[in-house]
Image: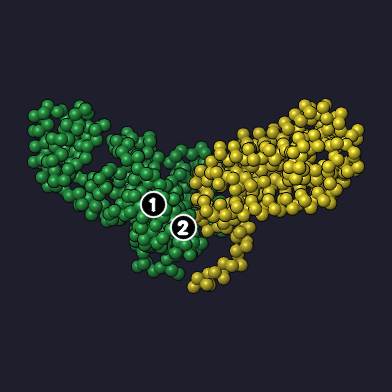
Chain colours: A green, B yellow
Amino acid sequence: MTGSMSEPAIVVEGLVKRYGKVVALDGIDLQVPPATVLGLLGPNGAGKTTAVRILTTLLGPDAGKATVAGFDVVRQAEELRHVIGLAGQNAAVDENLTGLENLEMVGRLYHVPAPEARRRGEELLERFELTAAAHRTAKTYSGGMRRRLDLGASLVGSPQVLFLDEPTTGLDPRSRLEMWDIIRELVKEGTTLLLTTQYLEEADRLADKIAVIDLGKVIAEGTSDELKARVGGEVLALSVADRERAAEAAGEVLGLGPGGGNVDNKTGEIQIPVGSDGTAILTEAVRRLDAQGIRLADIGLRRPTLDDVFLSLTGHAAEGGTEGEASEDGDSPKKKRKRDREKART
Amino acid sequence: MSAITETLREPGRLANTVSDWWVLTKRNLVTYLRKPDLLVFSTIQPVMFVLLFVFVFGGAFERILPANVSYVDFLMPGIFVQTAIFAATQTGVGLADDLQKGLIDRFRSLPMARSAVLAGRTAADTVSVAFQTVLMLIVAYAVGYRLHEGGLEALLAFALIIAVGYVVTWIAAFAGLALKTIEAVQAALFTIVFPFVFVSSAFVPVATFEPWLQPIARNNPVTIWVNTVRVLTLGDRVTESKSLLFADIPALGNLLWTSTLWLVGILVVASFLGVRKYRQT
């Protein structure tokens, strides 16, 4: 009907949204081709959720325009709702209904006849391995099960374009991996997906293209490899045994790379992009620190992560993770940074 | 193309809207039955009100009531209206809960009738008002309450009580959407509802109030509704009584249209505000 396969599934042009004096979106442009995944990556307050809310007709933009599957988000909001699915930040399921009842209800609200809604609900429960819990109320579900049910609810209408707002925030590592598998399956089937995340690794694993967003602006766009290439070469990562001396150590070694680096005084971790001179710089760093009697807990060269990209683009780290998952990959210190940023609704 | 789909959808539009209302009403009723704490307390509360008021205040009132009116007969119309109003505030709590859990966002992203979330919630909570009213009637009957007028008058009184509950669910809906958290909604509604119920003829005769308070109390819609239910259930005992308690109660005709006027007026304003707030949320 609208939008041939060659037209982008999502087009965003100069989108602006303000909450009082806080500018949540400061004129963003995006294009998502059909059957691809765009990862919208940014810290809390960057404007990710605001963008999703506008694209799913929950919120009107102050300026700019956007279309989803060819439908204008403002003028054709009702038509648009027929072709999208949304799973928001908190699993939006009714905890006093059973898993099946939740999906049936959503099906009925798409005006699918009752038996069909039931069949569709059972199919989705089967697919997300919730059949055994189909007749239990959702309040008995674990966090991961609720998220899967929520995702199931967003798929009841067989959407052309799916919006997932931080689909794994708050999940334990195992549930997160399960969620990633599910999302990859969906994309294989040809659904266009816009995914927001604070996790660099998540965007790296799931998205075809990544738009890095900070303070309401898209500050970089490209594939994961393209973004990593911006950092260039390898990263020297070292960890000072005596944290008190982290600043001192940084003074010794930061100048070694072509463009400075990042120090965390609390954990004693230092990261320096080193280009192609990795080995020489590593040797020099060890020599200098040894001369000062600064002991290291760890040192090594690694490939740059999106973390490094974010750091080099914004001058601060992406805010990784919420409470409760700090132990997962040692990224915990990042969440402490930049908490003082002005927080619009993310 | 879109014109064709538009016309194709048009005949089904009303049917879809009604279906959406029903789906959400059913959802709210089902979940109501699955919240045992809510169910237990909303059952005990009205029973408690009846018993407390009858046995605590009853003795003091027997002296000033006309010989042919027992205190329980005088009191129950007040308790009915009060409980309907209190029960209806649950709508605000329910909506704030849905809002916090993200359910309202999900509903708003679906191609369903915009009106269904509020219509389904207010309808389900009105069913709960009706349930509590019937329950109170049974308990009150057990402690001596009697309907002194005909069945038609009794039905009219019942309809009025339910209508009061329905109208208040819309006030609560607006409060729920505007205040957004359960705690704030509960505190705000309690603060608004309490003076309306107590500065009325529900429990104590208006003629015994401070003089400056009396005109306010007489024009309080709660007074008008309670008096209407009184006349519909006590009949002549009220209208022909020279008692202090009933001296200022207008004739039934007058009461019926002022009651209706208040109900319609509040419904129009509250539903307008509620729907507007829902669209903005």
Q: In the visual, does A277 lie left or right of B164? A: left
B155 relative position to A36: left or right: right
Please state if B69 lies on the left or on the right of A189 as rendered. Answer: right
Q: Is residue B108 visible?
A: yes
Residue farthest toward the front in the current orientation of the protein: B212
Position of residue A203 in the picture relative to residue B20 (left or right): left
Q: Tag 1, which secondary structure?
A: strand
Residue depicted at 44% across the width and 56% down the height: A54
Q: Earlier in the sequence, mark 2 or mark 1?
A: 1
User: What is the secondary structure assignment of the residue under circle 2?
Assistant: loop
Residue A286 rendering spot, x and y as whole percentages: 11, 34
Q: Picture coordinates of residue A200 (x, y %)?
A: 30, 46
Amino acid marked by disc 1: Val
User: Considering depth in this image, is B197 or B220 the residue closer to the camera?
Assistant: B220
**Host chain of mark 2:** A
Pointer 2: what residue? A60
> Label 1 marks which chain's residue?
A
Which residue corresponds to the image point at 77% horizontal and 51% vertical from the top-left?
Answer: B258
Q: CA distance from mark 2 to mark 1?
A: 14 Å
Q: Which amino acid lies under the numbered mark 2 shown in the image of this protein?
A: Gly
Q: Is there CB contact under 8 Å for labels 2 and 1?
A: no
Residue A239 horizontal/vertical position (percent): 20, 33
- Which residue matches tag 1? A23
| Vertical position of residue B38 compared to residue A345: above or below | above
